[in-house]
Amino acid sequence: MRPVRLGLAAALLLIAGGPAAAWEAPPGKPPGKPQRIVSLNLCADELLLRLVGPERLAAVTWLARDPRASTVAALASRVPVNHGTAEEILPLNPDLIVAGRYTTRVAVGLLTRLDAPLLELNVPQSVAGVAEQIRGLARAVGEPERGEALVDGLLSRLDALPPAAPGPRPTAVVLRPNGLVAGSGSLADELLTRAGLENMADRLPLGSQGALPLEAIILGGADALIVDAAPDAPPSLVGALLHHPALKAMKRQVRTLSLPSRLWTCPGPQIAEAAERLAAAREAVP
Amino acid sequence: MRIETHGLSATAGGRTILADVTLAIEPGAFTGLIGPNGAGKTSLLRLLAGLAEPAAGRVTYDGRSAAQVGRRALARGIAYLPQSGPVHWPLRAEALVMLGRLPHRGPLGGIAAADRAAVERALSTADTAHLRGRTVGTLSGGERMRVLLARALATEAPVLLADEPVAALDPGHQLACMALLRDAARRGSGVVAVLHDLTLAARFCDRLILLANGSLLAEGPPSRVLTDENLCAAYGIAIHRGEAGGEPFLLPWHALPSPTCLPETP
Amino acid sequence: MTAAATWESRIPYPALIAGLTLLALALCAVSAAVGYVPFDLGAALSDWLAGRPTLGALVLAELRLPRALLGLLVGFSLGLTGAAMQGWLRNPLAEPGLVGVSSAAALGAVIVFYSGLSAALSLALPLGGMAGAAAAAVLLNLMAARGAGTTALVIGGIAINSLAGSLTALALNLAPNPYAALEIVFWLMGSLADRGTDQLWLVLPPMLAGWALCLSGARALDALTLGEDAARSLGFDLAGLRVRLIAGAALAVGSAVSVTGAVGFVGLVAPHLMRPLAGARPGRLLLLAGLAGACLTLAADIAVRLLPTRPELKLGVVTALIGAPFLIALIARLRREEA
């Protein structure tokens, strides 16, 4: 767990330090509009499909077509897919490759030898970071206006969330697969706050770090339990934990909300919907 | 119980190991089953015990088939002592002998006084009462064989089928064991033992069955079975005959060159 | 000295059973009391009994108790099946884990679970485990049933284990879920963490049926001490025994593995520890080994929660740490005996 946490922290610093530099097109190349863009990361798929549409994309990941994981499955059905291997990418002769900072490292390592510029997306941990990432990617693909429009739409929906009632806010814990919770400093944490909830992950009996036994989450006594899973997700043990009878029993005492991962795993305009659902859940807390 | 076989044949791996054997095992008699290695003695004994299916022919128990008698009733009627009987767990001798009482115990029934009494009788008959507390692994080969014999005796079945019961025993215990089997027959049991020692067979058995190459070569009282021709034909041996204390005895004396087994060399 | 005293073990059988049962129940209570977050157990207990839905009562009734009871049931199943298989194959190495029955059960459960069948029908999960366990037991019967020598048994076990293991990895790789490949550790090592009442009720009936089938073979297993011919001459139907034991092992181990993964070595260690107390009689060993298996599993599951590792160690890691030295010693002894 720790190396991942440190990695996330490093990613945060990178974004805060100089995001603009990261998105600048490499020098010596005209900042034209790339026509054969390849994406190696689901979050990049989502943003690219919204920013440039299917026509200029040479490939997106196979995950983008899965409506349970992706919010752009319909658009992705018109684009060839890849599985994150360099062999699939080379014949496409891409003029821009977009990858995630932490995924498909082997393919990315090989693809750096190509002439095509390579962009690596970080994992933003705040709404500001999300906006920066959208703008940066939009510049790289030559669509700054559409990027700005996406950001404006996101921010205006977040601003339109109903204001929190006076007095103490209802507490909430975000339960993710494998007994993980969303701690402070995460994007989920900011969305909770914007939705008028108070993230109590750091006040759980065993803290918010690492995989937690279910009893630590239950005995934390939050007013609302936000389960980060789609009801129709493919079966997994970590997902099964979210349907544990103890959590079912808790529904009688605690407000529980199932929030599909696709709405807030990737930075993008869809996080506005996540925040809206959280706000609606807050309204329903007794 | 009277066991009869009618035209009994058995095969193993396509090879005939018993052919057309018809005989009867009478109660009250000690029958020795003799013959050279590979003659089919163990196969015949297993068929008699209902442990194998014949390729042809049938075995009857007081005129009924094994299926008609029923597995449990047959187990109470026939005690079977396998050759060099394996013992897979280090049981104490007395617990091992108690296994012989399993056919008499109901599915949930515990050990009754009758079971304990039968075990005591078997232990003392087989001269193993002093071994009762020992685990099987600590026994000598002969002690082990006697404990296994006691296990077969403890069933107190009307028929006892024993495969080479004296093979592992010292001469003293061989004599004691043969006397014990003869006494059991005197008390009314039908006793069949596979034997290799012709001297003992001649002296203790009431009847002998001589098998050779899967066929019944001779059957009857020892004097009629253990003729020079039969022994030459079955084993390829010549024997030395003598007399001790008014009783005749015979000893295997030398092997004969195989093709020239002619009757009555002068 | 009475005749009975020499071949009964020094401790009378009913006293042994009673003692082990009490120990298992005590360990069950300790297991329910041990957890990660301290809370008022007494208050939780009275809340639960009074039907007050407090968080403490919820944790006790829906997390701590199912975990403790599943530990008891799974341990009993593994210990009992281990003893039954050892008696059947007449080899002290015959154990659900070593001979591949557990890993085949895990394969069956994995296929059912990741294909989504168990989401549609929860009973499909133990059924998948049972099918896997039964297939392995039948395969084992083909390879090694006739008085299995240690070599035949170990080689057969290696073959089934590696086949089931690689097919499990394959099934997990084909699964549509991104976490599936990580979850192989649960299926191969086993864990009782965060198990629930739904799983408890799901596996209880097949386990009880499996226990009954295994225990019904006690007399025949005693008789098998003398080999197959002698056992049959004592009136036992060995074909029927084989069917009962394969079905019993499949029901008990298959359902256990389908909710806790393949916990190893319990079926090896429990019968081994109890054999002297049973006077080495395979029939008498069954119940003792089941109870000892329950105690071992509960103790190991208490240990994983007391050890300062987070996330907690898989249960099978602890049982393997205890069991592997046993196995090595046992193999050394068997080699001496066979030499």
Image: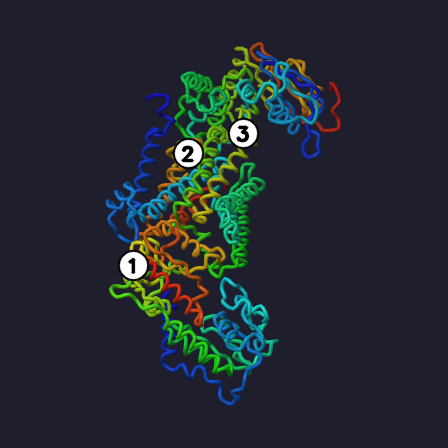
Please state if C266 lies on the left or on the right of B65 as rendered.
left
* Crowding at mark 1 (Cα within 10 Å: few <14, some 14-19, many 20+): some
Please state if A24 lies on the left or on the right of B190 as rendered.
left
Label 2 sits on residue? C285
Quadrant of the snapshot with the C terminus of chain B: top right
- Which element is circle 3 on? loop
Q: Amino acid at mark 1?
A: Leu
Quadrant of the snapshot with the N terminus of chain B: top right
Query: Could you tell me residue B119's position as x and y percent?
Result: 44, 19
Q: Nearer the viewer, residue A80 or A144?
A: A144
Q: Where C28 falls versus C218 (above or below)?
A: below
Query: Could you tell me residue C144's position as x and y percent?
Result: 56, 40
Nearer to us: label 2 or label 3: 2
Q: Are marks 2 and 3 in contact (CB under 8 Å)?
A: no
Q: CA distance from mark 2 to mark 3?
A: 26 Å
- Which element is circle 1 on? loop
| Chain for numbered disc 3 | B
Query: Could you tell me residue C152's position as x and y percent?
Result: 55, 43
Q: Where C51 falls versus A87 (above or below)?
A: above
Label 3 sits on residue? B84
Please state if A249 lies on the left or on the right of C151 as rendered.
left
Residue B205 visible in image:
yes
Q: Amino acid at mark 2?
A: Leu
Q: CA distance from mark 3 to mark 1?
A: 65 Å
Q: Amino acid at mark 3?
A: Ser
Q: Nearer the viewer, residue C246 or B21?
A: C246
Q: Which mark is residue A206?
A: 1
